[in-house]
Image: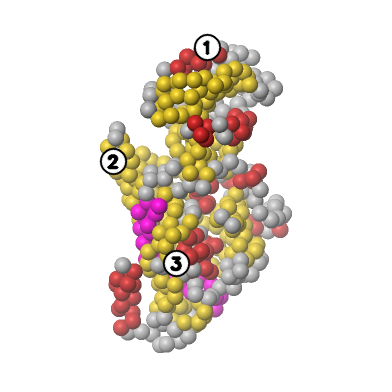
Amino acid sequence: MVRLLFAALVGGVLATPSFAQNVKLAEDLQPGEYHRYELELTVAGKLKVDRNGKPDALPLKAEASHRFVERIETTDARGGAGKVIRHYEKAKSNSVVSGEKSARELADDRRVTVAGRTETGTVHYSPLGPLFREELELIAEHFDTMVLAGLLPNKELKPGETWTLASEAVQHACQFEGITKNELVGMLISVEAGIAKFTIVGVAEGVELGAATKTTVKASGSFDLKSSRISQLNWEQADDRGQGPASPAAELTATIALKRTVLAEEPKELNATVREKIPAGKATPEQTILRYTDVDGKYSFTYPREWVIVGRTDQHLLIRLVEKAEFIAQVTLSSWKKAEPGQHATAEEFKQSFAKLPGWTPTETTEDGVVGAPAGHWLYKVAAKGKQDGADVLQTFYLFAGPNGDQVAVSVLASPEKGGKTSAREGQLLGAIVFPAPKK
């Protein structure tokens, strides 16, 4: 397959090659270096879902546009970027899934961000405060510009010669959490007017969003010999992704157009005053927490990234705890009817609300009563073993009330084996819920 792709893409070029000039395709990035990026993305394909026990395909189209300046803070062992600071002039996307439109844009007060390599991947955050999940996806899921140096062979080649891409670079470029197969091959095509043209084609396999994924890549780029930097890249990849613990199966084709400019002067958006706000070292858990606000503003909270939003309506928010691609628990948050200030629903009213949940058959109540809560708040908890749609589960139900009568119901669904191990995580979520201040 790789050879067929390779022959189709470069066969014509090899028949009439340019002069055999040896050039070194390598970047040696330096701390304090500045770049400007322009990225355009288009995606088309389908999501594979189950509806009423039958497979269904939801058509998807999306586009995204990013403009940002970047400063190299540290480099890695290969001379690529290890940690960068960015200022986004623009970060927005639009998508349509089965006719339903969605638009996202990075907030003005979160336009300064940091990206840093770690042992397990790349961590993105804003030093200005927590991001919404949608904002994190905007800045973390566009093409990984930190990988550009890693795409190159870091040696001299002449037109027609090839190299196999490093698996680490392929993992970042394809946005895998882990890589199982790498057959991506680069080729130097031509050298003319100070620009070296190259291609990258092949197949890679890995894990994305906890699901097995096969990716076919066809890309072409320009390497500026004067700056020794990739200046342009057109990257097309076709993904065949299986079902994951927090995402549906999908068949998607993404096309990315990247333009990169080396800046001779420091951009004002990343001047010394801005950089003073950037913490040294690796990101801390406090810096990487995310934020959520109910669609009607009835409550808000912050949460660790292990919790993934998988669905929402006007009344409900559905999130899942996923660790190392493994499903741990599912939480549903529901806005509850408001009580008078200083009041809350009774325990009996609360228990009646979930006593007849569809598919739920309790067999043993393991906990029932008021538990500790912040001053002025009230928290009631019921935990029970039983069956949900025929499967053995442990369900925990909470009703959390604020001093002004605001209330939110929280239910946690987990297997009996894992359910007892999530109470601390549940407590963190509940403790982070904030109700709006009363209007004056």
Residue denoted by label 2: 56
Q: CA distance from mark 2 to mark 1?
A: 41 Å
The kind of residue tagged 2 is: Asp
The residue lying toward the viewer, choosing from 164 and 85, is 164
Q: CA distance from mark 1 to mark 3?
A: 62 Å
> At x 40% / y 78%, what residue is drawn?
189
Of label 2 and label 1, which has the lower sequence position? 2
Helix, strand or loop at mark 1: helix
**Membership of 219 in magenta stretch:** yes
Q: In front: mark 3 or mark 2?
A: 2
Residue denoted by label 3: 233
Is residue 49 something one can see in this rendering?
A: yes
Whether residue 128 is situated above or below residue 37 in the rendered picture: above
Of label 1 and label 3, which has the lower sequence position? 3
Which residues fall within the magenta stretch? 212-241
Q: Position of residue 71 (x, y in %)?
A: 62, 62
The kind of residue tagged 3 is: Leu
